[in-house]
Amino acid sequence: MNQQLSKNTSKQESKIVVEATNLNHSYGEGKLEKQILFDINLKLYSSEVIILKGPSGSGKTTLLTLMGGLRSAQSGSLKVFGEELVGANKDKLIQIRRNIGYIFQAHNLLKSLTARQNVQMSIELHEEISPKEAKEKSIAMLETVGLKDWINYYPDNLSGGQKQRVAIARALVSQPAMVLADEPTAALDSKSGRNVVELMQQLAKEQGCTILIVTHDDRILDVAERIIELEDGKLTRKDKSKQELISN
Ligand SMILES: Nc1ncnc2c1ncn2[C@@H]1O[C@H](COP(=O)(O)OP(=O)(O)OP(=O)(O)O)[C@@H](O)[C@H]1O
Ligand SMILES: [Mg+2]
């Protein structure tokens, strides 16, 4: 399934990768139920870099985790790689997750593994790649994110920004069909933040990968082809070009 998906996404320009139709989401049950996402309608295409903006608490992470199959979608429709996630079973969610690279606000590296081992771990889900190749790819990806001299360091001995770059290498190394990044540049200085998003942008072009970046960082808005915005759980100003939005 992995190979099938990446083949399809790289060959067909503007294939629909995510399609949400009247998607709603609530946390809690009964009297404590609180609706967070309202009637989300959205399409993401292959090779696109999309930025998702919006105030704290507006539902950005919730939407990202739904699209990533990390949380069960409840009502409406949410198709990822053509598979319906509303009502999907665990196996289907696991299959979907294999084709997605995740980068979160907290880097979630394993402390007992070196930078290289943390990156390599995500390739090991892909049986078609030999351990030798996995090691080489991990080293090459760490070099690409500027960590050539830190390959054998443990997370405790890396700075916040360096740890986040390891997390980015880990998400990108197996060339996923989609990367979901929640504030990937928050811990980085402006130059490394820029490098990281440009690297993601380059991957989107080369691999036909879709990249969704949640950010508050206005300095990186120009890497996106599209900027979408959530406000109180509703999408606003969707599908406007970045030029219109930046000049607003
Ligand atoms: N697991 C959860 N259980 C209950 N409520 C939650 C849960 N996760 C998030 N929420 C609530 O849902 C709303 C949206 O949260 P979410 O994390 O999606 O916002 P966000 O836009 O990512 O914010 P931020 O910019 O601060 O990261 C918030 O009111 C939050 O308190
Ligand atoms: Mg968030």
Image: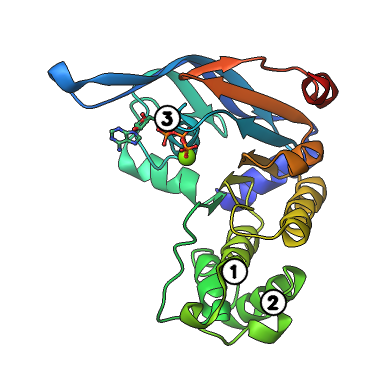
Q: Image check: 30 left or right of 24?
A: left
**Who's the residue at 38% across and 25% down the image?**
86
Name which residue lies at 74% across and 51% down. Answer: 197
Amino acid type at image mark 3:
Leu
Mark 3 vs mark 2: give the one in front.
2
Q: Amino acid at mark 1?
A: Val
Secondary structure of residue under mark 1: helix
Q: Secondary structure at mark 3?
A: loop
Colour scheme: rainbow
Q: Is residue 47 visible?
A: no
Q: Examine the rendered structure and indicate whether residue 107 appears above or below residue 78.
A: below
Q: Residue furthest left?
A: 31
Residue 144 in which image quadrant: bottom right
Res 29 visible: yes
- The foreground one among 219 and 113 is 219
Q: Check contact, mark 3 vs mark 1: CB within 8 A.
A: no
Q: Nearer the viewer, residue 83 or 120?
A: 120
| Of pointers 1 and 2, the one earlier in the residue sequence | 2
Amino acid type at circle 2 is Leu
When asked about the image quadrant of residue 187, the answer is: bottom right
Quickly name the residue at label 2: 147
* Residue under pointer 1: 166
Q: Callout 3: 10 Å neighbours few (<14), some, many (20+)?
A: many
Query: How far is disc 1 from disc 2 in space, using C-alphas?
Result: 8 Å
Residue at disc 3, CB closer than 8 Å to ligand 1: no
**What residue is shown with label 3?**
85
Q: Residues within 10 Å of mark 2 (few under 14, many from 20)?
A: many
